[in-house]
Structure formats: structure tokens, C-alpha cells
Image (cartoon, rainbow, N blue to C red):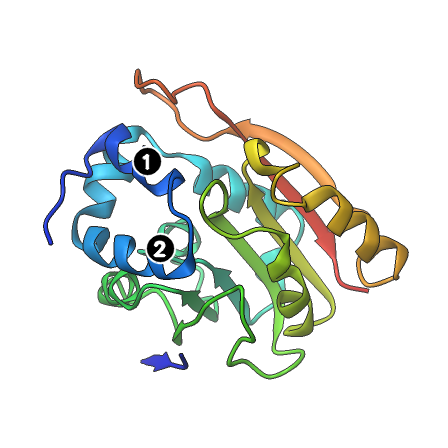
Amino acid sequence: MIKDKQGSKDKQGTKGLEAAYSLKTPEDSERYYGEWAGDYDRDFAQTMGYVFPAHLVARFRAEGGTAMEPILDVGAGTGLVAEELSGEGLVIDAIDISREMLEVAGAKGLYRDRIVGDLTKTLPIPDASYGALISSGTFTSGHVGAEAFGELIRIARPGALFCLGINPIVWESGGFQPAFDRLVEEGAITRPERERVPIYEGAEHEHADDPGEIVVFRKR
């Protein structure tokens, strides 16, 4: 079930990506992805050769994330990460700002709960609810920056695994390095490890060679 706690456009391929990168506010994201939801998997994931979720889930498995239920898929969208984890009978919840994207994900039968929520605000989730958090495509240009970490750490259990995709193009502008440094110094998290992986494969569009980063750490 969805817990709500809070036009037709040409969006195929790089046009959709460039428009997504230009978003400015959570309200922009909610509106844009709401309009794109029905065609997102075809227009973006398939057309662009989007393989980052597969790389992210491979690292998540290697870090033991599948043994740390329940899992929260942060910025879940249409459920591309959960699709990579499907077939294992895992307890996974989804949170996203777009109700429409979560409706698409819900039709795939991927999640226990789907939560409509803004990651830049207080989340409608109790403290220490999750053993692992995973995220793909959320910490990127025009989306969410390091301001979300406080709430995500709050809802994680002690020792919880974080496996987050962060686009290198926003590492500085999104305030990620100083945020991580502060959280490590405060003893809130372990020092993050960074792994560079492809975002796209088998594609010829202008973003085909863009790299992504997987950032892994644990709540202390």
C-alpha cells in the first residue's frame, strides 16, 4: 500500500535526462516525475542503457545488504533497484516524492510498503526502522543533496548499511564531502568508501560515458 505522508511532454532519451538535471525544487521533481512515470522505464532505462542499478545492487550484495532487512529503497522511482533484488523474497520498502512513480513500482509487486515523502524534509518513518538503505539516481544534479543524510541516518538501525549512488558531478556542489567529514568526525557513520562504475552501457548518446559512484558506509 502507499502511505501518503506528505501534460504530455517529449522526454525520450537525453531530452528527459537533461530536463531532470535542470530541476530546482522538490515540487519540480514531484511534477516532472509524475508526468514521466508511465513511460520512464521505456524512455530512460531502456533507451539510455541505464545499468547503474545493477552495479549498485552487486555492491550491496557484496556488502551483505540482503541479510540486513528490512531494506529501504531511497528515491525508488519505478522500482529499478528492487527489480535487481527481486526473486530473493526480501522485505523492501520504497520512498519517493512521486506518487505516480510509486504506482508504477507497485504494479510490479516489488515492495512491502511504498511511502510518498520528500527527502529534504522530516520523513514519516520511525527511528531505527531499517537495517539497510540503498539508492540509485537520487543524489544527482537537480535532485537531492547531502541535506537528506540526517533523516536517513535517523531512520537507520545502528550498524545499518548505506549503499548510495552519488553522481560525481554534484559531489562538491551538493555538499557531500563536508557532510561526510562531519558525520565521521561526530561518530555517526564509518568512513565512506567510493567506487566508480558506469551509469550506462551499450549506448551511444552524449551521456554514454558518464561515470557514477557508489558510496558505502555504515551507521555507528
Element type where label 2 sits in the image:
helix
Task: Say what amino acid the circle numbered 1 marks.
Answer: Leu
Q: Quadrant of the C terminus?
A: bottom right
Q: Does residue 195 lie above or below 121 as drawn?
A: above
Task: For marks 1 and 2, give the one nearer the viewer.
Answer: 2
Inspect this view and state whether residue 190 appears. Answer: no
Q: Which residue is mark 1?
A: 17
Q: Does residue 183 lie above or below 170 as drawn?
A: below
Q: Residue at x 40, y 34 (%)?
A: 51
C-alpha gap between disc 1 and disc 2 = 12 Å
**For mark 2, does the 10 Å Cα neighbourhood hold few (<14), some (14 to 19), or many (20 or more) residues?**
many
| Residue 54 image offset from top left, x and y in percent | 45, 40
| Residue 142 image offset from top left, x and y in percent | 44, 45
Element type where label 1 sits in the image:
helix
Q: Residue at x 39, y 22 (%)?
A: 207
Extreme residue in the front direction: 24
Q: Is residue 208 left or right of residue 99?
A: right
Camera-nearest residue between 119 and 51? 119
Q: Quadrant of the N terminus?
A: bottom left
Mark 2 or mark 1, which is nearer the start of the sequence? 1
| Residue 192 image offset from top left, x and y in percent | 76, 45
How many numbered dots are placed on residues in this image?
2
The disc placed on residue 101 is none
Q: Residue at x 68, y 73 (%)?
A: 154
Q: Which residue is mark 2?
A: 29
Q: Is residue 9 left or right of residue 190?
A: left
**For mark 1, does the 10 Å Cα neighbourhood hold few (<14), some (14 to 19), or many (20 or more) residues?**
some
| Residue 73 image offset from top left, x and y in percent | 48, 61
Inspect this view and state whether residue 142 appears. Answer: yes
